[in-house]
Image (cartoon, grey):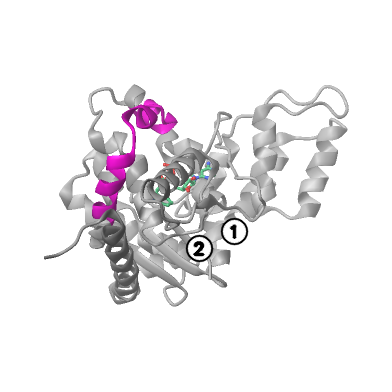
């Protein structure tokens, strides 16, 4: 059976981009596949979180994932830091990763630009840690958004290099996965690029946002001065509004506003009201569930305990085999 794996760093709350770009695919796949899901708390150390906050951040993100439909009966759910095997594989992979290729990774270059005073080795080797997360369970598919495509490509490079170096066919080469085939990028509300939590509160719609917050954010989304001629090409801002609508509204609603846009009678205010209404219908039940789960410590710890055992068993097996391939032997 094919193995699916995904993970998320415990930083902030889940937004629509996380949900539709990555999580929804995982949730569908957990019905039919061997699935692993983990909270990437080792990865979050690159930014030196306060020890007092770390556990709470893990708990927040875990509750949100469970509320979205991550199922502890179907998937193996665990916290990355409870799997020390991951760090051992990370070290082996660092032996075969080249400095040049790590320095060329876009996310690394972005971080260097954003935080020139915190260019640590953990940041540089983020892709080898991520590769270790994936290869430790020999995953075949990784449901992630478009921004992670390069990290996945590197995972394939490391897996292939390991196989070649030791002349084995041990690690499968993992692929990114989206049901719609194309990897998705959910746009933000500010008219620029993607929805992301580091791009300002107003850019992203979070699953914990109140109805009023959702209405307010959508009403302030960037638009343009309106189409001047029939079937005019949409500006990026308007394209983004339609993309968001395609996630939560019915086909009839979308067709209605497409038609209004194409014959120049569209009123963006009306479109935003409808989008806010549909967004609230989608988000509010998830939000209620999040609030319920985050106060249920027994449910959370049961979910994690079940997962941890299964995850360790799988990770120990891989490490045992990898050590053998590398040539370590006991006396
Ligand atoms: P953020 O960009 O908000 O910090 P993360 O980097 O923690 O989000 O991403 C967690 C997961 O959500 C990853 O799989 C990532 O590809 C996906 N993701 C994040 N933002 C988007 C987006 N706007 N569109 C599609 N997928 C996204
Ligand atoms: N890099 C991912 C992100 O920022 C998080 C992550 C770490 C991950 N290890 C992973 C995702 C392994 C999928 C598989 O979103």
- The answer to whether one can see residue 12 in this image is no
Residue indicated by mark 1: 282
Name the residue rendered at 44%, 54% in the picture. Answer: 208
Q: Is residue 241 left or right of residue 65?
A: right
- Foreground residue, 142 or 197? 142
Name the residue rendered at 55%, 49% in the picture. Answer: 21
Residue indicated by mark 2: 286
Q: Tell me where the magenta segment starts and ends, as one range.
A: 86-111
- Foreground residue, 275 or 298? 298
Marks 1 and 2, how far apart at CA: 8 Å
Q: Position of residue 294 (x, y in %)?
A: 34, 65
- The answer to whether one can see residue 301 in this image is yes
Quarter of the rendering occupied by the C terminus: bottom left
Q: Is residue 116 left or right of residue 274?
A: left
Q: How many marks?
A: 2
Residue 289's quadrant in the figure? bottom left
Q: Residue furthest left?
A: 331
Name the residue rendered at 77%, 47% in the picture. Answer: 254
Are the two marked residues, 1 and 2, in contact with CB atoms closer than 8 angstroms? yes
Name the residue rendered at 56%, 36% in the picture. Answer: 189
Q: Position of residue 209 (x, y in %)?
A: 46, 51
Tell me if residue 278 comes above or below residue 220 in the rendering. below
Prevailing secondary structure class for the magenta stretch in the rendered image:
helix
Q: Secondary structure at mark 2?
A: helix
Task: Return the mark for residue 297.
Answer: none
Q: Position of residue 142 (x, y in %)?
A: 50, 54
Residue 38 colored in magenta in the image: no
Q: Is residue 13 left or right of residue 115?
A: right
- Foreground residue, 147 or 319? 319
């Amino acid at each position: 059976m094919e193995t699916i794996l995904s993970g998320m760093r415990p930083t902030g709350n889940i937004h629509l981009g996380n949900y539709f770009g990555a999580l929804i695919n995982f949730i569908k796949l957990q019905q039919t596949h061997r699935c692993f899901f983990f909270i990437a708390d080792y990865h979050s150390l690159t930014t030196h979180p306060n020890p007092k906050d770390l556990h709470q951040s893990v708990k927040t993100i875990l509750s949100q994932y469970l509320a979205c439909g991550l199922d502890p009966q179907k998937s193996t759910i665990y916290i990355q830091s409870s799997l020390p095997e991951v760090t051992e594989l990370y070290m082996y992979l660092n032996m075969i990763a080249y400095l040049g290729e790590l320095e060329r990774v876009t996310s690394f270059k972005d971080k260097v630009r954003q935080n020139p005073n915190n260019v640590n080795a953990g940041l540089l080797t983020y892709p080898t840690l991520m590769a270790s997360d994936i290869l430790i369970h020999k995953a075949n598919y990784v449901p992630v958004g478009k921004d992670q495509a390069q990290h996945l490509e590197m995972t394939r490079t490391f897996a292939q290099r390991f196989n070649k170096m030791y002349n084995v066919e041990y690690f499968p080469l993992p692929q990114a996965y989206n049901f719609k085939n194309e990897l998705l990028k959910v746009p933000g509300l500010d008219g620029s690029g993607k929805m992301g939590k580091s791009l300002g509160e107003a850019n992203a719609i979070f699953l914990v946002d109140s109805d009023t917050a959702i209405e307010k954010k959508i009403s302030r989304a960037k638009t343009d001065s309106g189409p001047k001629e029939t079937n005019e090409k949409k500006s990026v801002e308007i394209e983004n509004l339609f993309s968001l609508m395609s996630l939560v509204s019915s086909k009839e609603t979308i067709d209605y506003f497409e038609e209004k846009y194409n014959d120049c009678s569209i009123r963006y205010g009306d479109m935003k009201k409808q989008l806010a209404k549909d967004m609230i219908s989608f988000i509010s039940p998830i939000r209620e569930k999040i609030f319920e789960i985050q106060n249920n410590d027994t449910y959370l710890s049961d979910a994690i305990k079940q997962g941890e055992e299964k995850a360790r068993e799988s990770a120990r097996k891989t490490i045992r085999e990898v050590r053998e391939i590398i040539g370590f032997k006991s006396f």
